[in-house]
Amino acid sequence: MKITISEVAEKAGVSIKTVSRVMNNEAGVRNATKEKVKAAMLELNYKPSQAARSLASTQSFQIGFIYDNPNAYYVIDMQNGILEVCHQSNYELLIHPCNASSNNIVEEILQLIKKSNLDGLVLTPPLSENQHLIFELQKKNICFVRVISGKGNIEESSQCIFVNDRSASTAITEYLLELGHKDIAFICGDAEHKSSRERFDGFQQALKQHGVALNPDFIIDGTYSFESGVNGARKLLELPKKPTAIFASNDEIAAGALFACRLEGVDIPSTISIVGFENSPFSRQTWPKLTTAEQPTKNIAKAATELLLRQMRNQVSDQLVEFNPELLVRESTTNLANESPVLYTRIEDVDFI
């Protein structure tokens, strides 16, 4: 026979609402009351159900993670981080992939919230940067947290987790300059992602601070994909004057660039150094392994979910949450002065997935 929330409340001598608040880790419940409820749940072997909690509250105890991102590793890390906090707080997670460039994306998300009775949303780029969507969510008083690229500001601290891509990009570029590289190429990510602009701006900033001119031939438009890295590197290798280093906007692009260089018989890092960004599994699966910026995606997801839950419980504070990815040096970069260029026999074109 399944134990109900009403039986737990009766056993503990409290209201159903109090049991719900204890299960939801809400503030304002006395420790003695919490212990009585937890003891009753343990004695009755009560397993909370979303339906029972919803009956005792106006909440559904369900949040949504809505995303449009081709990087499966990023999505998995976000899911795992959100789920960890959800399990600790007895919340369910609805995961909804979508096409952020769709003409009716705002209507699609609003309908999803209504249909699934979601209590709140975790949004990642580019959805977290869609101002029309943000306006509609605010207008309808829907709780949400945005993971966005940029330096944190206190005005948005209750709704945003900031990732300072620009400072990390500046640090990576300065590292390449310290190695003696001045002919540094940059392969961009998707134009609609703010992170692409922030990482490129950090790159430009470092060059300017060190008096190194930006070569427009070394700036390659791209997307956050392996294929973009392959195509971008091939364009760079066709130039009369080739770069001695390539800064790729993420590890997937960097892995593609490394692959293209290997096909052309270009040794990494003695001829060209390559760096990525994010420290995704791509950076550890290449040979040599990639120098990159370590971005703690799972911790970012956990922080976003914790901020969302505080917001839903009206526990909003002005505490700023900002992550600064850190330089992680591996074997794909080297000091330009200490190495002589090495060329390998060219490998015939190979199809890749």
Image: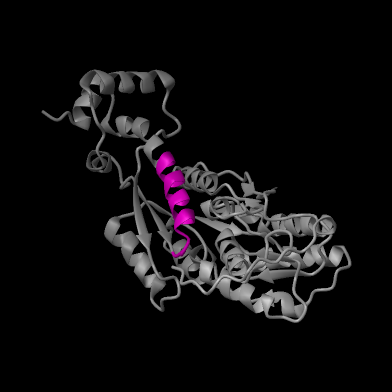
Left or right: residue 61 compared with residue 319: left
Q: Position of residue 303 (x, y in %)?
A: 53, 44
Confirm whether residue 223 shows in the render: yes
Left or right: residue 264 compared with residue 340: left
Q: Position of residue 152 (x, y in %)?
A: 66, 54
- Residue 26 or 86: which is nearer the viewer? 86
Left or right: residue 59 compared with residue 319: left
Reply above or below: 244 against 338: below
Q: Position of residue 180 (x, y in %)?
A: 84, 60
Quadrant into which the N terminus falls: top left
**Main secondary structure type of the part rendered in magenta:** helix
**Residue at the spot 49% in from the left edge and 71% down from the top edge:** 350
- Residue 222 or 9: which is nearer the viewer? 222
Residue 196, quarter of the rendered image: bottom right
Reply above or below: 339 against 348: above
Residue found farthest to the left: 1
Residue 336, quarter of the rendered image: bottom right
**Residue at the spot 41% in from the left edge and 62% down from the top edge:** 140
**Residue at the spot 63% in from the left edge and 64% down from the top edge:** 249
Left or right: residue 122 compared with residue 178: left
Q: Position of residue 302 (x, y in %)?
A: 49, 44
Residue found farthest to the right: 211
**The magenta stretch spans which residues?**
68-85
Residue 347 lies in magenta, yes or no? no
Quadrant into which the C terminus falls: bottom left
Q: Across the whole image, how many numbered discs are drawn on residues?
A: 0
Confirm whether residue 225 shows in the render: no
Reply above or below: 329 against 269: above
